[in-house]
Every structure is written in C-alpha cells, then in structure tokens.
Image: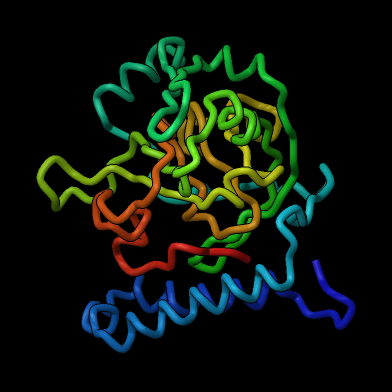
Amino acid sequence: MRDKQGFDRRGFLKRVFVLGGTLLLAGCDQLSSSDWFRRMLFRAETLTRTTQRAILGPNDMAREYTEADISPDFKPNGSIDPQDEDYLALSADSFKNWKLKVGGLVERPMEWSLADLRALPSRTQITRHDCVEGWSCIGKWKGVPLKTLLDQVGLKPEARYIVFYCADTLDQTLAGGAKYYESLGLPDAEHAQTILAYEMNGQTLPVAHGAPLRLRVERQLGYKMAKYVMRIEAVADYADIDGGKGGFWEDRGYEWYAGI
C-alpha cells in the first residue's frame, strides 16, 4: 500500500525491523545487551509506533490480496511441532477436547471449543505475512475476530493489553522451558483484521502453522502472530509476565510494537 508520493511505508518499516532483527539473530549478544543499543531500540520502537499512528487511522486496513496472489509455499514461522504433552494429547484427538479460555480483567470469563468458535461470525482475509528475518508470504486466513470474543467477555475499564499464552516451548535452557507468549494493546486487539484463525488457504489450520488456533494481526510483523494459542488474558500491564517486555521475543530484545 503506497501513499500519494509512492512511499511504501510497510516496506520501509519492515526494513528497519529486519536490520535490528538480523543483528539479534546473528548472535550479537554483547551489542544487544549494551545500554546504548537498548536505548536505540526503544527510540526506534517509539518512532515506529508514532509514525504508524500518524499515518494510519485506528480503522485503516492492511492490504488484502486476491486468490491468485496466494503463495504456493507458505513458510511456517517460529516453532512447527510443539512437544508439550498436553498439546500432543489434544492434537492426537484433532483438538476435539481443546478449549480456548479467556479471562483476566473481564466481567465474564468464558471458554470456547473449536466447534464453538467456528459457529461464531467469521472473517476471511488474504494478507501478506512479513517476517523479521526478511521473507514474506501471502496466505488466506479464516477465523473469528478477536473483538467478538472480547465483547462477549466484557473488558473491565482497567484492561489495557491482551496477552496470548501458547503451547510451544522455545527456550529449553530455562527450568521447565519457556513457552511462547505475546501481547497486543487494545487498538490492535480490536482491529477488524485481528482474528483468531482456524483455517489457512481453505483448509483446517495445520500444526506447522499453529493449529488449532493462531493470532493474525495483519498490521504487525510475524513474530506478533502467536501460534498454538491456548489461553487469553486481559491485563492492566505486562511488566510482571515472564521477562516483563510483553512477549517471548520482546523479552530477548525485539520491539514490543512491531507495526508495518
């Protein structure tokens, strides 16, 4: 999507994140742990967030594509085969006994089976997935808008963030491992294109892409799109959750706001 001057804002912001992400993925531990580098990342995140908020309105949409644009081979991001025992048991039964729990700062904590979610109003969108590692793919996603669930549970006034807890364990160096988690502010959580997807390219969501349910937040980079979602909580702050930065990769140096 380009503005009247032909400026590709998604491409520009993506390149900024790719540069920072490449430094971290390359193992620049000394660099990423230095105070000046962390200050630079914080300034970059603030600039990105401020720039996107200035350019985009809260209801502006990420570009959507046609069926002809769908990538023939959509590379899965992150983990592709969780080995958590509870997850494996659910997967073996095609997730018939899986339930999504939504709680925290809500008026009515609720839970939904996969069949329950499929019975709710859905949204289908063909969008581009931009990875911090530099690659992009276009896919078709169908799921329930996150706002639909948030409206049903009723957010309390003090709720400011939505946190997603997942089944995949990425960091085996910690006792008990470290499961993936991610968070969004309310403006992105309630955006029309933010959905909990249970289908990909017209088929049931495969395990490699996050079955039974994955987050799609189309105006941000791929690491924000949590896979294997098991539980959702509304919170006032994420400072006391794991590393306190709002997400698995954020705790390891990535920016919390990954808008493109």
Q: What quarter of the picture does the N terminus occupy?
A: bottom right
Q: Quadrant of residue 245?
A: bottom left
Q: Quadrant of residue 56?
A: bottom right
Residue found at x 46% / y 43%: 159
Q: How many marks?
A: 0
Colouring method of the image: rainbow
Residue 184: give x, y in percent of width and height. Answer: 50, 50
Is residue 254 or residue 163 the one in the foreground?
Answer: 163
Left or right: residue 205 compared with residue 121: left
Extreme residue in the right direction: 4
Q: Quadrant of residue 148?
A: top right
Q: Is residue 18 visible?
A: no
Residue found at x 24% / y 79%: 33
Residue 73: give x, y in percent of width and height. Answer: 63, 47
Q: Is residue 159 above or below residue 119?
A: below
Extreme residue in the left direction: 175
Q: Is residue 158 above or below residue 53?
A: above
Residue 12: give x, y in percent of width and height. Answer: 65, 78
Residue 166: give x, y in percent of width and height. Answer: 37, 37
Left or right: residue 253 compared with residue 200: left
Residue found at x 45% / y 30%: 106
Q: What quarter of the picture does the C terminus occupy?
A: bottom right
Q: Is residue 113 above or below residue 138?
A: above
Left or right: residue 182 compared with residue 202: left
Extreme residue in the front direction: 157
Q: Is residue 130 above or below residue 164?
A: below
Q: Is residue 183 visible?
A: yes
Residue found at x 37% / y 54%: 247
